[in-house]
Image (cartoon, rainbow, N blue to C red):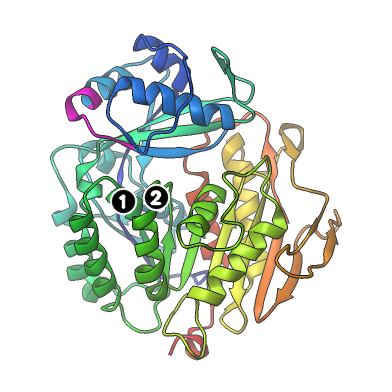
Amino acid sequence: MGQPGSTARRWVNACVDVVLSGVKLLQALGLRSGKGRDHAVLHSRKDLEEAFAHFMAQGAAAERFFSDQEAFHTIAQAASESPGAQHYVGGNAALIGQKFAANTDLQVLLCGPVGPKLHELLDDNIFVPPESLQEVDEFHLILEYQAGEEWGPFKAPHASRFIFSHDLSNGAMNALEVFVSSLEEFRPDLVVLSGLHMLAGRGEELQRKRLLEVVNSLSDIPAGVPVHLELASMTDRELMRSVVHQVFPAVTSLGLNEQELLFLSQAVSGPHAGISSWDGVPDVGMVSDILFWILKEHGRSESRASDLTRVHFHTLAYHILATVDGHWANQLAAVAAGARVAGTQACATEAIDTSRVTLRAPQEFMTSHSEVGTRVVLDPSKPVEQWHRGGVTFHFTPVLVCKDPVRTVGLGDAISAEGLFYSEAHLATGFE
């Protein structure tokens, strides 16, 4: 957590990402652009075709489970052999672990299903316990598209990606027991949990069983060790409700994007839950209302047994870090670092290249719509804005968005990793 020589633990999920052009793959599969339609679970190539079109038209990232194992393996083989396809470390846990491992002072333990290809791709600073090694990799297909790219009647408003997999290991959270057994030996300074979205489509009984085991496992983490939960795309409202009510109180920090934030609010009847989807750049005041509500209704307070004191929200145009007062420091640097890595990683540059980025954040905004907020006008010489509300501090910064991104997958994980790296948790007074 920003301290040289510290250790960081990464747990669930891990896979190999096959990254390629979504339009080219669907064309190679003989699929044609028809109507766009969302599917909570993909059961066929037709479902894939419709779901990809639906999210491409919105320029929105999404992730779905493909239920037909044989059909998925056929598609995955075609994707892997497609010209231009690239193989990368995948899964929220492994991606954040890679980002931490880039700092040579950090040791990272990855507890997740690691096959031979993924093991080969992982940074040398990442240790994988023998129990996490498996003979076959789990593949996730990342169908990317560029801003303005067309597929039949659909045109992407900006670059993003559609992810799908038939991932049984991560879906069953098979790394849970390995994680628990390695706690005492590794002695982490930070735990990052991800992969809960992979429980979608796995049946209510398994979901209940595994979430209960997750909460019990988190209770085994030594006092004073912060736990960050990174959310990902979900479609199961009951699963989201269970995560909010059961897992949120057991974690210290939360990372999520605009789709996950709105779905969360819809699932548990939070602020602005009546909005079906964001219209363009998410309204800052509405986002602020939901973040405030998360921390007030599900976060740390004198009357509630919850450890949650920090939420890192990231969307294409801007980021917001919301923290309960007295528990975190250096959040200005943390939110700025997250915004910086968003611009550099998307453009694959070491530093921000001003000729390749653009500003899409609102120049002025209200800090709330649920109550009387203040109007903020961005000052280019002071890019991080700060405001307070009911014991919660907000840090806002615009993002210099890459015009021609080389790769969009993993940006959210890199953003959360950078934000965590620069964050200072006041555990001595905040989490005893």
- Viewed as shown, does residue 270 lie left or right of 214? right
Residue 133, position in %: x, y?
17, 48
Q: Residues within 10 Å of mark 1 (few under 14, many from 20)?
A: many
Q: Residue furthest front?
A: 274
Residue 79, position in %: x, y?
33, 21
Vertical side of 318 occupied by 161: above or below: above
Secondary structure state at the residue bearing disc 2: helix
Indicate the amino acid at tag 1: Asn
Indicate the amino acid at tag 2: Asn
**Residue tagged by mark 1?**
13
Q: Residue at x 50, y 38 (%)?
A: 61
- Viewed as shown, does residue 149 lie left or right of 226? right
Q: Which residues are magenta?
A: 65-72
Number of the label disc, if any, that sits on residue 92 = 2
Nearest the camera: 282 or 331? 282
Vertical side of 33 occupied by 240: above or below: below
Q: Residues within 10 Å of mark 2 (few under 14, many from 20)?
A: many
Quarter of the image with the C terminus in it: bottom left
Contact between labelled residues 1 and 2, with CB atoms less than 8 Å apart: yes
Q: Residue at x 42, y 18 (%)?
A: 84
Labels 2 and 1: the sequence-earlier one: 1
Nearest the camera: 64 or 313? 64
Residue 240, position in %: x, y?
39, 57
Vertical side of 387 occupied by 363: above or below: above
